[in-house]
Image (cartoon, grey):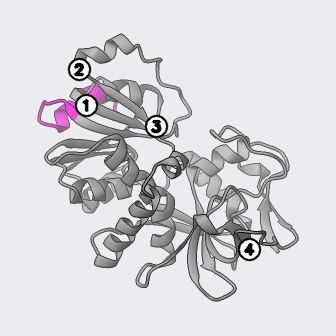
Amino acid sequence: MRAVQVTEFGGPEVLKVVELPDPVAGPGQVLIEVDRAGLNYADTHQAENSYLAPSALPLVPGAEVVGRTAEGKRVVALVTDGGYAERVAAEEAMTFPVPDGVDDLNALSMLVQGATAWVMLRKNAHLESGETVVVHAAAGGVGSIAVQLAKAWGAGRVIATASSEEKRALAVELGADVAVDSRADNMTDVLREANDGRRVDIVLDMVGGPTTDQSIAALAPFGRLVFYGMAGRRKPKPIELGNLLGHSTTVAGMWLPHAFTLPGNVFGAALNDLFAMVQAGTLRAVAGGEYALEEARAAHEALRSRGTTGKLLLNPRQ
């Protein structure tokens, strides 16, 4: 089968298309013919071995696929790696049926990005009706879904940040009340101005660096910032716990794999909710572009440039 393989860690240039033996499904696994794989910003960290979970060489990147089983059942699956290929062996426990009316784009978008937004708003931020929610990188895969969920779940005001007029217009189209330039010199002031001079209640942040520092400073009493990535590849300043007392501030981290450790099948509940909203037409993924296997390098370059919108797909059938 054809697959994208990494034999040395590095940037997009290390992604090479090769021929590999077909995977064999072991006990508790299912073999999936991959129709499309999802492209995530985390994949760029996996390729350079800077992700939370360390990688081992040789590596076939990719953590999510949609396709069909040998019985013709249409499924999505989370995998540790191996998604950038024509076939992959996935754990049955991490494989989920795709309902009618949910296309490949929406199936993959909800599996990681959608579930990430769901868990952050429900479990980390505990969104309450009427609260102000800031979504950084609001035109991206997670951000575009988070804007829609926050609005659907009763946020009083959704403030989106994005780096271009086109991205800000998209965020407003998805339901944001206002969209501001993510390149602002002082995000604290910008967020308060966008909230009629008031501090904000919730910030969803995957940027890092000064954006994180200034967003924390914009939080209202009992405000919550949920940190789920560092696309800017710049670390925020260390947090002094004593400083959190000034506004009873909560700063939380979120890594989606931890959702699987929670009782009550939280991930399954999230996916069911998200798929139902897609079927009802109240939630949609934003198409960010589709790439052939040979274009995996270009896809990673686009992700790292932070110039993309919505969900990017890799098509091993092209």
Query: Residues at badges 1 and 2 in contact (C-beta under 8 Å)?
Result: yes
- The answer, for residue 169, to whether it is visible in the render is no
Distance from disc 1 to disc 2, alpha carbons, whole Å, reads: 8 Å
| Residue under numbered circle 2 | 247
Distance from disc 3 to disc 2, alpha carbons, whole Å, reads: 22 Å
- The quarter in which the N terminus is drawn is bottom right
Tell which circle, 3 or 4, labels the residue nearer the N-terminal end: 4
Query: Residues at badges 1 and 4 in contact (C-beta under 8 Å)?
Result: no
Distance from disc 1 to disc 4, alpha carbons, whole Å, reads: 45 Å
Tell me the element at label 4: strand
Tell me the element at label 1: strand
Quarter-of-image position of residue 134: top left
Q: Which residue sits at x=34%, y=32%?
A: 184
Q: Which residues are magenta?
A: 181-200
Give the numbered dot on residue 207.
3
Q: Nearer the viewer, residue 52 or 299?
A: 52
Q: Amino acid at mark 2?
A: His
Other residues around mark 4 within 10 Å, as few (<14) / some (14–19) / many (≥20)? many
Q: Amino acid at mark 4?
A: Arg
Other residues around mark 2 within 10 Å, as few (<14) / some (14–19) / many (≥20)? some
Tell which circle, 3 or 2, labels the residue nearer the N-terminal end: 3
Query: Residues at badges 3 and 2 in contact (C-beta under 8 Å)?
Result: no
Distance from disc 2 to disc 4, alpha carbons, whole Å, reads: 51 Å
In the image, residue 292 above or below residue 33: above
| Residue under numbered circle 4 | 87
Left or right, 123 with respect to 141, comes to left
| Residue under numbered circle 1 | 223
Q: Which residue sits at x=74%, y=67%?
A: 294
Tell which circle, 1 or 2, labels the residue nearer the N-terminal end: 1
